[in-house]
Each structure stands twice: as structure tokens, then as C-alpha cells.
Amino acid sequence: MSANRLTVRVARKLAETADICSFELVDPGGGELPAFTAGSHIDVYLSDGLTRQYSLCNAPSERTRYRIAVLREPASRGGSHAMHDVVRENDLLEIGVPRNLFALAESAERHVLLAGGIGVTPLLCMAQRLAAIGADFRLHYCTRSAERAAFRGQLNEPPYAGRVDFHVDDGPPGQRLDLSAVCTPAAGTHLYVCGPKGFMDAVLGAARARGWPEDSLHYEFFAADPAPVEAGGAFSVKLASSGRVVDVPADCSVAQALARAGVDVPVACEQGICGTCLTRVLEGEPDHRDLFMSPQEQARNDQFTPCCSRAKTPLLVLDL
């Protein structure tokens, strides 16, 4: 077993809502699991080579379990189907050690958390950490209906009660999320958002339009809009270490072209969300299609995600 991989047992599988299941993962021998910080996720390695990322939603102080929650996706690429319909209690799963690409700025004076649907999972973990350290925070949780709000019972109890606002699409207009109010910047305040892409685009767009400092905005996408790779045309990449040139056809991603050429680049989400494949660009201009980097990071054009991004120039020289 790799040092970066663990075998865990599914101690509990629970239907949180009609389309969300939570999973409690423990060490098969009853030992402690590697520590994690709020905002962390794990890779879950499923059958047929599938790897999916799921945020940890239990308190970081807990060392004997990891808790994740999975939404059943109607257009599943296989991951949510496997987790909902194949994985059972007491099954053994292989997972990666926790990684954090969505960390809390714990020294901030105030924290505003905005969750859309299943995006509540990392923010629930954050709320638990913030409550534990006595930080000032507010969680806004948006769902289509009250019945679709996972962990509602937990969030209605101390120490979260009074710090959580539920916003449902089918409720009275007065309780719906007011982006103009929530996204008004304030000194010392950091904003965190996770959920469907449309929800996140609306939140981040509102915050940026109101002048929110980019280093105070924290976000993690769960899925990207599907984009045909044919839209980018063909180009080539050059490996700086050897000078080797690899052609990238119009119907193939950079990561796929490199893999076919025997060049190993770690890939997980294949959608430009997780940052696993982030690669330095030494020459050329990438065509960024990821959701991982901020606009400012993309504008530097010194790195890109070969799983989904392409090139605006005929050649990219990569630090490989």
C-alpha cells in the first residue's frame, strides 16, 4: 500500500436526504486516521479506475473517522452511482490521505460561509472548526427545499443554531439569499463558497463586482460544465527536460496525449477542479479551462491544468 493511500472500512452508510448518502470511514483495525484540517478532501478509488474527490464533513479534531457525503448525480460519470448503489456498510475502500486545497484563514476576524446543495460538506467541517476555536462566522445554506438540506438537524443545534441561515427555493421570498447584502465586503472578513457552478459563479461574481479582495475569497468547485475538447484545435507541447515534442490532437486532452506518449502526469478529477495535475508552463500561452486557479493566477500563464486546458499558441513548453 502506498504511503499516500489508506484502506478504510465503511462503518456506517446513512441516507441524509432522498439523494444524499453519508459514509463514515474508519481504520479496519480500530486505529487513528491521519489528521486533517477544515476544508480537506480525500480521493476515493473505485472500480474501473475511477477516482473521485469528496470533502470531509466531520470535525477536524476527530481522529477515528472520516465522514463524507455523496450526492446521487442523474448524469453520473460512475462515481456517485458506485457510492450509492455498490458500496455497502463493512466494505473496504481505498482512499488517499487528506489534502486541503480549500483552507480556512483562521486568523480572519470574521468568516462568511455560503453553501449550495452538496457544497455544504466542506463548509460543515469549517463551521465545526470555527465553533471550536470561538471564531465569528455565519453559514448560509441554500437548497431547493428543506427536505433536500442534509445535516439540517445538526446545524439546528448548538453551537451552530443562530449562526446558520437556511435559504430554500420553494420558500417565501423573504428568506431567499440576498447576494447584495451577503457579498458586501468588510475589513477582516473572508468569504468561502462551495456548490454547483452556477451558484458559485453568482456568489463570486457578486463579491468581485463589489470589490472584495481576491485573497479573501475562497472556493472549491465540485463539477465543471462539460466542454468539448474539439473546440480547442490541435497544438503541441514540449517537455523541457528532454526537448521531446508531443502532439495534442483536437479531440484529445494534454494529459491524455502525454499518457499515450508514456509521460506520467497525475490526474484525478479530469475537469480542472482539484489541481492534482497542475503543471508549470515555461513558454507559450495556455487556454485556461480550469476552475481551480483564480483569475489572477490564470492571468500569469505560468501554470495550467493539462486534464482540461489547452493552448492559445501552437506550442507550450512544460516543466516536465
Image: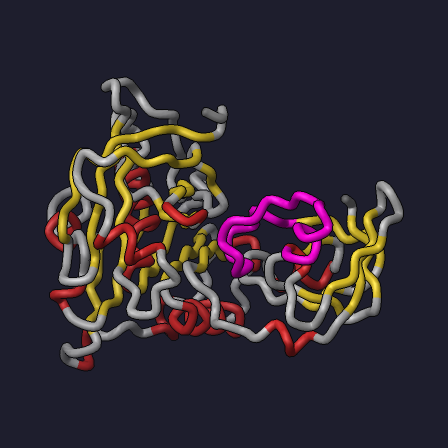
Q: Residue at x 21, y 47 (%)?
A: 22
Image quadrant of residue 107? top left
Question: If the image is split into quadrants, where does the C terminus sit?
Answer: top right
Can residue 50 be seen in the rendering of this structure?
yes
Residue 47 percent across, percent down from the top left: 37, 46
Horizontal side of 144 relative to 133 (left or right) equals left
Residue drawn at x 43%, y 43% is 104
Closer to the camera in the image, 10 or 296: 10
Residue 224 location in percent, x, y?
A: 47, 66
Q: How is the image coloured?
A: secondary structure
Q: Is residue 139 visible?
A: no
Decide whether residue 277 is among the magenta residues: yes
Q: Which image quadrant is residue 135 in?
A: top left
- Residue 55 covered by magenta stretch: no
Side of 109 where 291 appears, left or right? right
Residue sitting nearer the eye, 122 or 34: 34
Give the vertical position of 78 relative to 5 (above or below): below
Farthest residue to the right: give it. Answer: 243
User: At which x and y percent is residue 188?
Assistant: 47, 50
166 shown above or below 178 = above
Image quarter hosting the N terminus: top left
Compared with 195, 136 (above or below) is above
Percent across and percent down for residue 255 are: 65, 55
Q: Is residue 40 left or right of residue 304?
A: left
Residue under the point 39% across and 59% down? 194
Residue situated in front as seen by the camera: 283 or 7: 7
Secondary structure predominantly adopted by residues drawn in magenta: loop
The residue that appears at 22% across and 38% down in the rendered structure is: 24
Magenta-colored span: 256-278
Write down the quadrant of residue 68 in the picture: top left
